[in-house]
Image: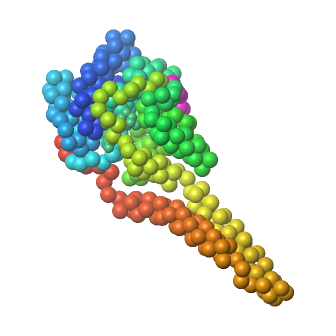
């Protein structure tokens, strides 16, 4: 196989504190790989400014003017990290590359692993997923929710390896297949896993964020997780149906018991607490089930409107 043209995709949201250092560092990595004859010299970076309110775009423009290998686009507003990644993948497919690696702007992922990604690609892998060695840098709550998310996904049937990240290499073949998926809320971690292309894994160390703060909060992580679940599994809907069946069965049996008691022993009242508890529990279960169904209805609603995934304001090629 011929050595590839590599595109490195970096989503950026208010990253003025990190960006210069990150871009310089990634350009160095490209230079080293070029000198080792592992990638072609027309390899480049593609930065997506996800509607930042700070000077992120100005920095991107400056770096583009200094080195044309720095390309990028600016979103008209913030669309979120997944959309920025999707835009990056679609843009580099358009510009042209043999493989693309996505990495965060804060350089938390070990950029030296890119070389291993390329080696795996040369061995024939179409997807190389970065697997975090540990979650030392994550706060306790994020660690806990991440473990819960991957466990849930696996129970629900979407086989995503735990400690998976959006640090991955995809080949132009995978990018081409992506064109066939019109889902607006494409969940990349699920998508690249279910394609069935040859996949390899590379462990990497997670570093502390270089500067600035994490752009994810509880709600954005929750949204990402719920989208992942509702995009890749209908098991919760089935669970609701099965749960409903058993609760109905239980209600039926309790009903018979009540009638029998009334007829033969005539001792109806006495049971205020039971009545209250049952009505609360069942009220809760019903609302929970409605919520689960609502999540799927919401997913259908968002998809059926077919709004654009993102809107580019300016593009530097
Ligand atoms: N990001 C983005 N849009 C957003 C939020 C985040 O493009 O709305 C980018 C961010 O600039 C970074 C990457 O997504 O390059 C990962 O974000 P962050 O490092 O804040 O997440 P964490 O590492 O804490 O999970
Ligand atoms: Mg980070």
Front residue of 182/128: it is 128
Side of 77 relative to 208 (left or right): left
Where in the figure is residue 265, as x and y percent of width and height? 83, 85
Is residue 28 positioned above or below 206 on the image? above
Magenta stretch in the rendered image: 198-203
- Taking the spot 60% from the left edge, 50% from the top edge, the residue there is 156
The outermost residue toward the right is 264
Where in the figure is residue 3, as x and y percent of width and height? 40, 19
Is residue 283 positioned above or below 3 on the image? below
Where in the figure is residue 41, as x and y percent of width and height? 29, 18
Image quarter hosting the N terminus: top left
Ligand 1 visible in quadrant: top left
Is residue 108 positioned above or below 265 on the image? above
**Figure coloring:** rainbow
Where in the figure is residue 234, as x and y percent of width and height? 56, 57
Front residue of 174/261: it is 261
Residue 288 forms part of the magenta stretch: no
């Amino acid at each position: 196989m011929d050595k590839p043209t590599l595109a490195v995709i970096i989503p950026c949201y208010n990253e003025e504190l990190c960006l210069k250092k990150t871009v310089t560092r990634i350009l160095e990595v490209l230079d080293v790989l070029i000198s080792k004859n592992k990638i072609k010299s027309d390899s480049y970076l593609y930065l997506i400014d996800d509607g930042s309110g700070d000077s992120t775009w100005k920095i991107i423009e400056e770096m583009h003017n200094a080195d044309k290998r720095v390309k990028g686009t600016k979103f008209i507003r913030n669309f979120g990290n997944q959309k920025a990644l999707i835009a990056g993948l679609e843009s580099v497919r358009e510009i042209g590359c043999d493989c693309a690696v996505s990495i965060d702007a804060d350089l938390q992922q070990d950029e030296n692993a890119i070389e291993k990604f390329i080696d795996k690609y040369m061995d024939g892998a179409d997807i190389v997923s970065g697997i975090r060695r540990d979650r030392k840098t994550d706060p306790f709550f994020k660690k806990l929710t991440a473990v819960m998310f991957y466990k849930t996904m696996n129970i629900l049937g979407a086989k995503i390896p735990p400690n998976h990240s959006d640090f991955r290499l995809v080949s132009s073949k995978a990018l081409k297949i992506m064109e066939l998926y019109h889902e607006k809320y494409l969940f990349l971690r699920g998508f690249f896993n279910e394609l069935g292309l040859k996949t390899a894994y590379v462990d990497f160390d997670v570093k502390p964020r270089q500067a600035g703060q994490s752009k994810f909060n509880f709600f954005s992580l929750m949204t990402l997780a719920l989208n992942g679940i509702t995009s890749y599994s209908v098991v919760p809907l089935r669970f609701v149906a099965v749960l409903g069946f058993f609760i109905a069965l239980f209600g039926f049996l309790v009903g018979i018991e009540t009638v029998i008691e009334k007829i033969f022993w005539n001792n109806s009242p006495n049971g205020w607490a039971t009545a209250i508890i049952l009505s609360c529990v069942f009220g809760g279960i019903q609302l929970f089930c409605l919520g689960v169904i609502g999540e799927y209805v919401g997913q259908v609603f968002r998809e059926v409107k077919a709004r654009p995934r993102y809107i580019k304001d300016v593009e530097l090629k």
